[in-house]
Amino acid sequence: MMSIERRHTRAGEARFIARVKSGGRLVTSKTFRRKGDAINWEREQYRRLAFGEFIPPARSAIPLAVVAE
């Protein structure tokens, strides 16, 4: 499950990119300064997927009033 990649900025600082996939497709990703934060975020996203609580970031920006219509 763990798909965390280490990258470096031009300044040489480490960044960790966490990617969440479902059904072989990338669902969301996020960049962190600390690996532990990336691991915790990724774990929470997979937990949400398992319990049906996950909302893709593209859909989460829609106001509730628009969805309710």
Image (cartoon, rainbow, N blue to C red):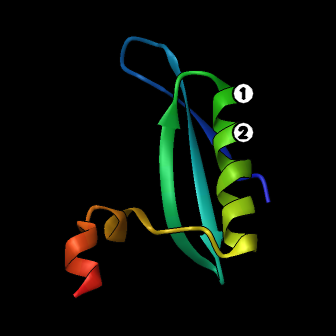
Question: What is the x, y in percent for residue 10?
Answer: 36, 19
In the image, residue 41 above or below residue 14: below
SS under mark 2 = helix
Q: Label 1 near label 2: C-beta < 8 Å?
A: yes
Question: Which quarter of the picture shows residue 35?
Answer: top right
Left or right? Give the position of 6 relative to 36: left
Q: Quadrant of the C terminus?
A: bottom left
SS under mark 1 = helix
Left or right? Give the position of 22 relative to 67: right
Q: Quadrant of the N terminus?
A: bottom right
- The residue pinned by badge 2 equals 39
Residue located at (72% from left, 39% from top): 39
Other residues around mark 1 within 10 Å, as few (<14) / some (14–19) / many (≥20) = few
Q: Nearer the viewer, residue 31 or 65?
A: 65
- The residue pinned by badge 1 equals 36
The amino acid marked with disc number 1 is Gly
Residue located at (69% from left, 50% from top): 44
